[in-house]
Amino acid sequence: MEKFSYINATSLEQVTSLLSESAWGEVMLIAGGTDLLAELKEYIETPKTLVNLKTLPGMDSITADASGLKIGALATVADIARHSTIQHHYTVLAQAAASVATPQIRNVGTIGGNLCQRPRCWYYRDETINCLKKGGDTCYAVDGLSKYHAILGGDPVYIVHPSDLAPALIALGASVKIVGPEGEKTMSLEEFFTLPATNPFRENVLEPNEIVVEVTVPAAKANTKSFYLKAREKGAPDFALSSVAGVFEMDGQTCKTASIVLGGVAPAPWRSKEAEAALTGKMIDESVSTQAGADAVKDAQPLNDNAYKVTLTQNLISRAAMMAAS
Amino acid sequence: MSDKEKKQGTNISRRNFLKGVGTGTVAATVVPSVLIGSEQAAEAQEGGAISSATIQLNINEKSYEVEVEARTTLLTVLRDGMDTSGNNVDLTGAKLICDRGECGGCTVMVDGQTVYACMMLAMDAQGKKITTIEGLANGDDLHPVQDAFIQHDALMCGFCTPGFVVSSAALLNENKTPSLDEIKDGLSGNTCRCGTYPFIFDAVKTASRKM
């Protein structure tokens, strides 16, 4: 790591003003640090200053009541995974949290950091490669090794968004509270993430001087089943090859509403309106669930090495739908 | 010349050195990540920003006063750090292996929870209770997990063992009677290249009956 200086944050105003006074990447924020330190060790980022957010009071709480969930940006992934209300009423989120990385990382990694983590693409993570995401002119996955890259929404940068929590939260209709120099604003988490066609360099709409402070989730509806299905290359902890966050409002075997958000297949968490339409109002059986999977990937454009993700994703969606009906 | 003076005399940045010789990827694994005891004394800059500082760390119920740079990891302090009296911290049980938070060789407990010491800044460990593999035994009385690892021969080369023992002890602190799946999940952040997993899982089962 290059040298940097370190400031313990005392207030959000201080944090946003420190960010405002510097260019992108000069001042960076650290919470758990499990993604950031890896980037610093690889010299992907070389900030002059790190601002430690863990000294901000009250930002690590999780509250669950009749209006839903409020999760402070500093709540750890482990806290979310073991929260009993989340386990029982927001199952998809608890399952997604439990699937993140390893116990050691879940113990320090935060929800804010999980949502803002950078891509795992091996070209992006290679210090010596100035790819399109880092301001170069080529996404090397297009003609290079693309086993773990995007099959949907890639053009022109074929990274996949690595977050497990994001698909689950979007499927639950979560919003994110953001603080900047002009105060706070709230937006749906779905709108928080952007595709490379809009901005090839970033994965979300945060301005350089803004910070995620809280995630809110509306109260779970009755008769809702939810699942997070994550396919990994091996049994051990890993990022998703493909994942499906499904939230199904059921009436017996009939699906009243479905919310299907994919991870690991696109540069942002990918809501599949096609799969949702194929399931909504239908009595779920094998042919309906198979059709939902097929519809979700009909526009997929795999690269040289990742066509397997098309079949994998299709089958994960079908499986999630069948689980909702059983 | 004391060790500390020798270290302070090194003014070549590791990165420039590596770039200069053009063997970055090879040399990265053998050069210590950050030399402690920097040329910069503890200094407060504008806005409370510090590039180095003298901090207190509570490791295995003993207080250590160490001078660290902002970029110094907890693992570097444990293995290569020196307290302000010039004594080496010398807690080398936690291993520097991948240095990226993937292998688990550097696992320690911070406030009872396992963390990768290579992925935690020393500054962030202030005010916390740090427990390393060296802090598990009580004198010559080994921790039940350590006894069970010996009993089950749960290691071959042994390089990953300290990390596995710390993860196992932390797991059993939270769950006295873990199932096999819970053991696998609890140890999923540690890697054994010799493949001794079945013996490790047996050892944790045995230890759980003794705790």
Image (spheres, rainbow, N blue to C red):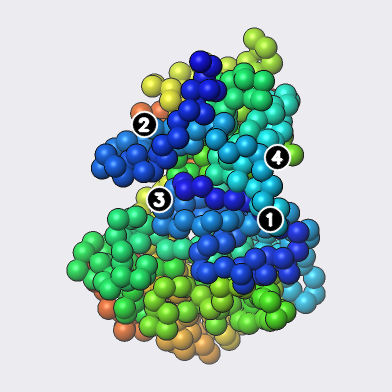
Q: Is residue A133 above or below residue B9?
A: below
Q: Say the numbered circle drawn on residue B198.
A: none
Relative image position of residue A222 (x, y in whole percent): 70, 78
The answer to whether marks 3 and 2 sit on the same chain is no
Q: Residues under labels 1 and 3: Cα distance?
A: 28 Å
Q: Mark 4 lies on which chain?
A: B
The image quadrant of residue A267 is: bottom left
The answer to whether marks 4 and 1 sit on the same chain is yes
The answer to whether marks 2 and 4 sit on the same chain is yes
Nearer mark to the viewer, of 1 and 3:
1
Residue topped by disc 2: B30
Relative image position of residue A22 (x, y in whole percent): 57, 68
Q: How many marks?
A: 4
Badge 4 crowding class, 10 Å Cα cut-off, few under 14, some 14 to 19, many 20 or more, is some
Residue topped by disc 1: B46
Image quadrant occupied by the C terminus of chain B: top right
Query: Which residue: 65% across, 66% down?
Result: A18
Closer-to-camera residue (A183/B158): A183
Q: Say the numbered circle drawn on residue B126.
A: 4
The answer to whether marks 4 and 3 sit on the same chain is no
Closer-to-camera residue (A136/A197): A136
Taking A52 as reference, is A131 left or right? Answer: left
Q: Residues under labels 3 and 2: Cα distance?
A: 16 Å
Residue topped by disc 3: A42
Q: Which residue lies furthest to the top in this view?
A: B140
Which badge, 2 or 1, is on the more N-terminal residue? 2
- The reply to whether residue A233 is visible in this rendering is yes
Three-letter code for the amino acid on which mark 3 is drawn:
Glu
